[in-house]
Image (cartoon, coloured by chain):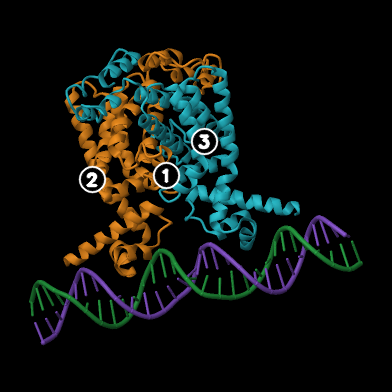
Chain colours: A cyan, B orange, C green, D purple
Amino acid sequence: MGKTAASTRKRILDAAEKLFADRGFHGVSVREIAREAGVDVALVSYHCGRKNDLFETVFLRRAEMLNEERLQMLAACRQAAAPDSPTLEAIIDAFTHPLLNRSARGSAGWKRFFALVAQVNNSPELAPIGMTKFFDPLVQEFIAALREALPGAREEDIYWSYHFLSGALTLTFAETGRIDKLSGGVCRSSDLDSVHERLVPYAAAGFRRLCAPSSEVAKASGKSAKSAANKARGKVTKANVRKAPDRGAKRAVRKSSAQIS
Amino acid sequence: MGKTAASTRKRILDAAEKLFADRGFHGVSVREIAREAGVDVALVSYHCGRKNDLFETVFLRRAEMLNEERLQMLAACRQAAAPDSPTLEAIIDAFTHPLLNRSARGSAGWKRFFALVAQVNNSPELAPIGMTKFFDPLVQEFIAALREALPGAREEDIYWSYHFLSGALTLTFAETGRIDKLSGGVCRSSDLDSVHERLVPYAAAGFRRLCAPSSEVAKASGKSAKSAANKARGKVTKANVRKAPDRGAKRAVRKSSAQIS
DNA sequence: AATTTATTTCAACGTTTGATGAAACGCAAG
DNA sequence: CTTGCGTTTCATCAAACGTTGAAATAAATT
């Protein structure tokens, strides 16, 4: 087991990580990976088995250490708040910080890994295998923490809120460069610090609005579900399209609360 | 031009749509598409050109009519609110309703198309081509409406807020079934009505929190950026992990507003 | 130094890939 | 009927695919 072998295996995994992140599992051939790594084709099978195994290895390699840190961070913020529940912001941050931080520090490897996760998360073919296998235990832990922080919330609302957060987070990591073009350069996909500042309050506000015991959605699932659903859907009605508040945003939040929730 | 030809082409496009949505562009072969459509391989090239063209055609086929409806809906809610700006909820709904509604009505074709969009949106390889080409003009229109509805908001905050909405929306359409397993059956990926009720208020709350003129993020980009950023990042501090409010959610919203924004 | 083990190279396997040219078909118009 | 055109079938192309033995080399162990 010379050190050559170890570095060869690492080169293969790094090359695979990069190419898988760029073009997905099916978009990359084993031969391309070997070429990118600068090794013979047969060495891929020798060190990493079949293509499926290689993919799983690439995925697992970082997922494990990442989730460990996320759980530690959750435990830390729980302990700091004990015996009370941590704030929503602290929980969401424990969920996103380990990702955004690594990425923002410019680690190319981690960035590629996260881009890969983004693709897997949105793939009907791969998500049931990859995401469920590597992330669901962690997510269950976070859901439990969120449940404590949101007393009186309905289960569906918590899960859907988490789902929206997951979507926002993964699209961010995809780093497709789309927001760059869209904003004419005002925003940059690679500027994860900017995301960091914004995603936590954005998601927290969404959670509170949706998971409030008095929320309209909660009421909607009761007796008068239909009309409530129409309102929630933003059906164009007199009440819904009325003038946007012009006296500051705090007021807007409360108005909206009164109106919708 | 016998009617056989028209139905053949349609069968090919439908088959391609289904398979592309399931396994992505590279995960499907032209021969599989032909088999699924029940036609000879050569007919795919004959009717739809090369694989790339076929993919674009599948994408374009529904994107055009969809975006037309979205723009009409935006115009309608703008007109209904004139001369004032429509509410945030109405704008976001005009953006999401045409998608969620078609999907919720159970159209298998549309569902597949949206699943395809979700994959493209999260693909560094395909997003710059597909999403930018077909959706950016529409998105610019919505950004403009959002800007009007959020006076005093910073450009970056609007774009990032839109980005988060886009991520939440596309992950929903991916319909990977993950939330089903995660929630133990409490939520169903296919239940787009439930999403419909929840995504609009969730996103609207996020927009308001982030795009408020008095928001912390806005302040953070000023002089005391560092400490503000730390707070936004939810760094575990005394202030951040303090007890969650126990007297209802509305109170929680206001507390949080005071604390973070 | 000799022997064993780990790693790398080379060549090849059977399949599948995207794409196309030539021939055969169906069918309406002249 | 037959000419012409849109459509379909069939056969085939070179290239790339994932994977694997067997030989060659490097490294570690005795």
Q: Nearer the viewer, residue B200 or B94?
A: B200
Query: From the viewer's perspective, is the residue at label 2 or at label 3 nearer?
Result: 3
In percent of width and height, residue A250 lies at: 35, 14
Q: To which chain does the residue with label 3 belong?
A: A
In the rendered structure, which amino acid carries the disc numbered 2? Met
* Residue positioned 42% across, 14% down in the render: B246
Residue designated by label 2: B65
- Residue at image point 33% right, 65% down: B34
The secondary structure type at the circle numbered 1 is: loop
Which is nearer the N-term, disc 3 or disc 1? 1
The image's mark for residue A138 is 3
Element carrying mark 3: helix
Residue D28 rendering spot, x and y as whole percentages = 81, 55
**Residue C18 on image: x %, y %:** 40, 64
Q: Quadrant of the C terminus of chain A?
A: top left
Which residue matches tag 1? A122
Task: Count residues near mark 2 (Cα–Cα under 10 Å), then give few for <14, some for 14-19, many for 20+.
Answer: few
Q: Residues within 10 Å of mark 1 (few under 14, many from 20)?
A: many
Q: Are marks 2 and 3 on the same chain?
A: no
In the rendered view, tell whether residue B193 sits above or below residue B59: above
Q: Position of residue B138 (x, y in %)?
A: 29, 38
Q: What amino acid is found at the position of numbered circle 1 in the picture?
A: Asn
The kind of residue tagged 3 is Leu
**Camera-side residue of B90 and A188:** B90
Q: CA distance from mark 2 to mark 3?
A: 41 Å
Foreground of the two, B62 or B46: B62
